[in-house]
Amino acid sequence: SQTIHQWPATLVQPVGSPLSLECTVEGTSNPNLYWYRQAAGRGLQLLFYSVGIGQISSEVPQNLSASRPQDRQFILSSKKLLLSDSGFYLCAYRTRGRPSNGYTFGSGTRLTVV
Amino acid sequence: DQQVKQNSPSLSVQEGRISILNCDYTNSMFDYFLWYKKYPAEGPTFLISISSIKDKNEDGRFTVFLNKSAKHLSLHIVPSQPGDSAVYFCAASKRSQGNLIFGKGTKLSVKP
């Protein structure tokens, strides 16, 4: 069966510290992978998506970056966190060739930058 | 510029009554629409979808209506239950691109 794992569930980091959030998918090959952020009053904002290993598209210019070192691994990073990076980060995948299925989301990471 | 709009941030409904959540979109290239349900501290879960070739799709207590000319869709929940209390996100995609564009969400509260 297809599953998606995202960790950690919660994270409190000081301003200026680095960030690494990891997401892995099981049960499917060559998925499209996505990072979303839910901030207060902003809904679900698409940050990055990837259609293959090493292929990253950025939707919103900002302090964050993403990488896909393996087919089913997606990493969200920052070298120096800002207060405005606080939010609920969600990883999602979509099985290739099946656009009508929408996305499957992970359980999310609540990031608080202090 | 928001392409998918949910203009009601919240909605309160009595248990057993109908809940109607609304969504508008601006991009006529969208041809697939979805509703997701999200509980606090969890990822959104897929609820129901509709293709632009249809104007209605029903799944149990949930029905989605699509009015292409008005670029409007709605989610009806009948009868509403307290467990339906959650944030509901409307989403749309263009088949050629596939990325989902989400609205800001509507928080539904179903009171016993």
Image (cartoon, rainbow, N blue to C red):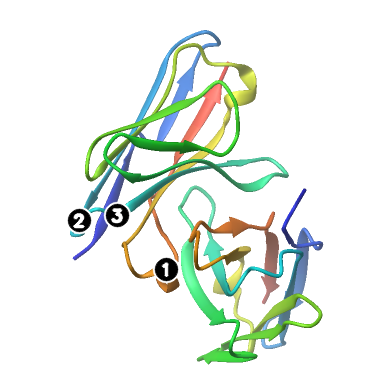
Of the numbered discs 2 and 1, the one sitting upstream in the chain is 2
> Where is mark 1, residue-wise?
A99
| In the image: residue A36, left or right of residue B7 | left
Local secondary structure at mark 2 = loop
Residue B69: where, in percent of width, then height? Answer: 79, 83
Nearer to me, B111 or A57: A57
At horizontal 80% and vertical 63% (from top left) the residue drawn is B8
Mark seen at residue A31: 3
Q: How many marks?
A: 3
Q: Does B81 appear above or below A75?
A: below
Nearer to me, B16 or A28: A28
Looking at the image, the residue that sits furthest to the front is B96
Whole-number angstrom distance, CA of label 3 to CA of label 2: 6 Å
Quadrant in which the C terminus of chain B appears: bottom right
Local secondary structure at mark 3 = loop
Whole-number angstrom distance, CA of label 2 to CA of label 1: 15 Å
The quadrant in which residue A112 appears is top right
Q: Chain of mark 1?
A: A
